[in-house]
Image (tube, coloured by chain):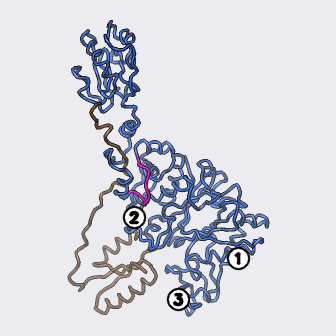
């Protein structure tokens, strides 16, 4: 019989994925100290997230740190780009109250 | 043809064909007789030996000539085909070539073999090459187990998938008039473009037939709206997934189930349309359990949850009409749901009595002490529907009564009431009640709260003809906080 050929030795399928390559980003550099930093506190509006952030704010303020509060419209969607921009331009670090 | 054919006679052969091997000496005779002969080979580039075969193992020429048999002889004048014969026939070859006494010692006739470009598996490869499909190709060797290969790549929901060959994807694309490169939706959490082609690949994986494909596309469009919020629904720790409810003539045309075991297994359209949507979320959106899908428990509906409303037997207007579409329009309605939760009432023959049973069943969604937090779908079976039909209750009247029956005083709903810490946050000094997600639920300390809003209680008619049972499909976070049901027309 004939030798095999490339055509009938291989089966072809189509990739169902978005074909993206995952990019690994490194974390932003952590400050050695919070002295003089502005700390953002982001409430994603999960129940009792505000309780956690209220307490954290009190403790940070007692240390003389400046805090700014932010709030997502809903925890089920990514933060609006304007909010992300505001946080990035006004704060040095951010604490996000993630879960209930 | 991109380039003109060589003048004279063109012969196309393959080594795997006994007739082609038989006529090799005859081809040599033609060459010796001075016939301008060019031999193309479909498989072995060195066959036939001594005749300087031209390599057509990529089958470009064979496809362009639309060959179905080898050997084929083609007469070429001025670069164009003017005549052709197939197989071996001494008189036909002698007449065709003008050379007498060919093939001494050979049988008079011998049929040819199927041309390689007509081999079913090769057709798929050729179709992929010429189709313009843009998806990345995965090549598997013949001995590789394709089902295992797809599991290994994480392309499945845990069940085996139908291998997405180019031919199958092309057939799926014939189910829609939309262009393969058109973007249907942007699918989170990766926020990646879902083209018609990518949707088709996943519809093949899911096991869809091409005629289901327009329903899949409409479901993807509806799911990926800001209102429905598929991304958030995927991410939630709650156990919901997208529920696809189909209305209009398409449901019957593609054989969807709206009757016996309507919310269960066994119907291909119901099963695979819902599955295709979830595979698109997984493969195109990048939404996988344990990664962005953080469901604490999940539910079997996250494999697939799709059904059609029984419109013909319904006492009421279809869900799609209620939601603003003209009768006879095919639609999908997406609901962020879990369940189903069954309701048994075999004694009520009066609508008021049956409505009370239904209100109790609906009260269990999420938690009996949580109000205005979620939506729900009430699936009314034919035997329960009959009670309302005979009493002349419209769907609106049933809904209104269910909302009344589902309204509870804050003294019952309040966190801590009745020995249970869960419940609504009722301010001690009065003021608006705060919902579980920090939104204002409305109401006041003196009044009560309904379980649902009027637009958050969907009622459909479906199920088998026997059984005084209905079902509740509980929802997720309702409204702008979470998900709003979305209806889209199914278009060709």
Query: How many numbered badges does the structure rendering display?
Result: 3
Residue position for label 3 = B421
- Alpha carbon of mark 2 to alpha carbon of mark 3: how far? 33 Å
Residue position for label 2 = B288
User: Is B363 on the left-hand or right-hand side of B30?
Assistant: right
Image location of residue A89, percent across then percent down? 30, 74
- The residue carrying pointer 3 sits among few (fewer than 14), some (14 to 19) or many (20 or more) residues within 10 Å by Cα, namely few
Is residue B483 visible from the viewing direction of this image?
A: yes
Is B327 within the magenta?
no
Image location of residue B29, percent across then percent down? 27, 12
Q: Which chain is blue?
A: B
Depth check, front residue: B261 or B294: B261
Residue position for label 1 = B356
B298 above or below B109? below
Q: Which chain is brown?
A: A
Pick out the residue farthest to the right. Answer: B391
The stretch in magenta equals B155-164
B81 above or below A80? above
- Alpha carbon of mark 3 to alpha carbon of mark 1: how far? 26 Å
- Alpha carbon of mark 1 to alpha carbon of mark 2: how far? 40 Å
Is B161 within the magenta?
yes
């Amino acid at each position: 019989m004939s030798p095999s050929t490339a055509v009938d030795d291989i089966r072809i399928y189509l990739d169902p994925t978005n074909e993206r390559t995952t990019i690994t980003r490194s974390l932003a550099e952590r400050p050695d100290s919070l002295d003089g930093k502005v700390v953002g506190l982001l409430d994603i509006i999960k129940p009792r997230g505000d309780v956690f952030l209220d307490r954290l704010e009190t403790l940070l303020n007692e240390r003389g740190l400046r805090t700014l509060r932010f709030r997502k419209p809903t925890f089920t969607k990514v933060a609006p780009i304007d909010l992300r921009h505001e946080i990035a331009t006004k704060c040095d670090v951010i604490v996000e109250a993630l879960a209930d | 043809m991109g380039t003109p054919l060589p003048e004279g006679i063109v012969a196309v052969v393959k080594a795997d064909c006994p007739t082609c091997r038989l006529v090799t000496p005859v081809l040599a005779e033609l060459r010796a007789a001075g016939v301008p002969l060019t031999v193309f080979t479909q498989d072995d580039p060195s066959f036939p030996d001594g005749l300087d075969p031209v390599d057509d193992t990529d089958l470009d020429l064979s496809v362009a000539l639309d060959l179905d048999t080898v050997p084929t002889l083609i007469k070429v004048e001025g670069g164009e085909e003017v005549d052709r014969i197939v197989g071996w026939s001494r008189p036909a070859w002698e007449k065709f070539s003008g050379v007498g006494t060919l093939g001494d010692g050979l049988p008079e006739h011998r049929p040819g073999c199927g041309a390689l470009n007509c081999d079913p598996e090769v057709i798929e490869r050729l179709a992929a090459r010429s189709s313009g499909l843009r998806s990345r190709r995965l090549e598997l060797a013949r001995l590789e187990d394709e089902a295992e290969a797809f599991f290994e790549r994480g392309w499945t929901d845990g069940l085996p998938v139908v291998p997405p060959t180019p031919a199958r994807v092309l057939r799926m694309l014939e189910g829609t008039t939309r262009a393969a490169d058109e973007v249907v939706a942007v699918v989170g959490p990766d926020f990646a473009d879902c083209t018609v082609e990518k949707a088709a690949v996943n519809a093949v994986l899911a096991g869809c037939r091409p005629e289901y494909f327009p329903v899949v596309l409409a479901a993807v469009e509806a799911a990926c709206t800001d209102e429905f919020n598929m991304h958030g629904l995927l991410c939630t720790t709650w156990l919901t997934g997208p529920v696809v409810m189909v209305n209009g003539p398409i449901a019957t045309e593609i054989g969807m189930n709206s009757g016996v075991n309507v919310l269960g297994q066994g119907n291909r359209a119901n099963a695979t349309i819902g599955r295709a949507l979830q595979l698109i979320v997984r493969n195109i959106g990048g939404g996988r359990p344990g990664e962005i899908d953080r469901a604490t428990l999940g539910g079997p509906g996250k494999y697939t949850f799709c059904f059609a409303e029984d419109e013909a037997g319904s006492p009421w207007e279809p869900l799609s009409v209620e939601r603003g579409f003209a009768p006879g329009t095919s639609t999908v309605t997406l609901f962020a749901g879990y369940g189903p939760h069954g309701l048994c009432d075999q004694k009520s023959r009066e609508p008021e009595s049956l409505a009370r049973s239904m209100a109790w069943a609906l009260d269990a969604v999420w938690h009996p002490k949580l109000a205005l937090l979620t939506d729900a779908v009430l699936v009314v079976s034919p035997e329960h529907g009959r009670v309302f039909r005979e009493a002349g209750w419209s769907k609106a009247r049933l809904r209104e009564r269910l909302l009344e029956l589902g309204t509870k005083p804050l003294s019952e709903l309040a966190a801590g009431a009745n020995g249970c810490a869960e419940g609504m946050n009722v301010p001690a000094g009065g003021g608006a009640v705060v919902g579980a997600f920090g939104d204002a639920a409305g109401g006041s300390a003196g009044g009560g709260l309904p379980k649902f809003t009027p637009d958050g209680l969907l009622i459909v008619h479906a199920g088998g003809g026997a059984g005084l049972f209905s079902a509740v499909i509980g929802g997720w976070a309702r409204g702008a906080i979470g998900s709003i049901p979305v209806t889209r027309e199914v278009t060709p």
